[in-house]
Amino acid sequence: MTYLITIGVMVALVFAWVMVQTMARQHAERHPEFGPLREEGAGCGCGNHRCGESQCKKGAN
């Protein structure tokens, strides 16, 4: 029984996370003045060098 409850909780958490992502995307569509939605692991930022930059320029003043 504990095994089934654990699986049920994990499935519920996955569905809850999908709902959070959907709500964030909808909010970003309704409010373009805040800029595009930055999803985890995508886009530019320190530590994520997908934008052609080899180093983080955050502290380079």
Image (cartoon, rainbow, N blue to C red):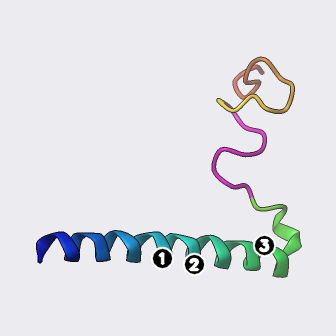
Q: Nearer the viewer, mark 3 or mark 2?
A: 2
At mark 1, the secondary structure is helix
Q: Which mark is residue 5?
A: none
Res 19 label: 2
Residue 40, placed above or below residue 9: above
Considering only vertical position in the picture, is 54 above or below 13? Answer: above
Residue position for label 1: 16
- Sort mark 2 into few (<14), some (14-19) or many (20+) by Cα contacts within 10 Å: few
Q: Which residues are magenta?
A: 38-46
Question: Residue 8 or 25: which is nearer the viewer?
Answer: 8
Residue 59, percent across and down? Answer: 69, 24
Q: Position of residue 51 (x, y in %)?
A: 84, 32
What residue is pinned by disc 3?
28
Q: How much space separates mark 2 and mark 1, taking CA atoms?
A: 5 Å
Label 3 vs 2, first from the N-terminus = 2
Q: How many marks?
A: 3
Query: Relative to the observer, which residue lies in front, 12 or 58?
Result: 12
Q: Is residue 11 left or right of residue 5?
A: right
Q: Please identify the quadrant where the C terminus is shown.
A: top right
**Residue 26 part of the magenta segment:** no
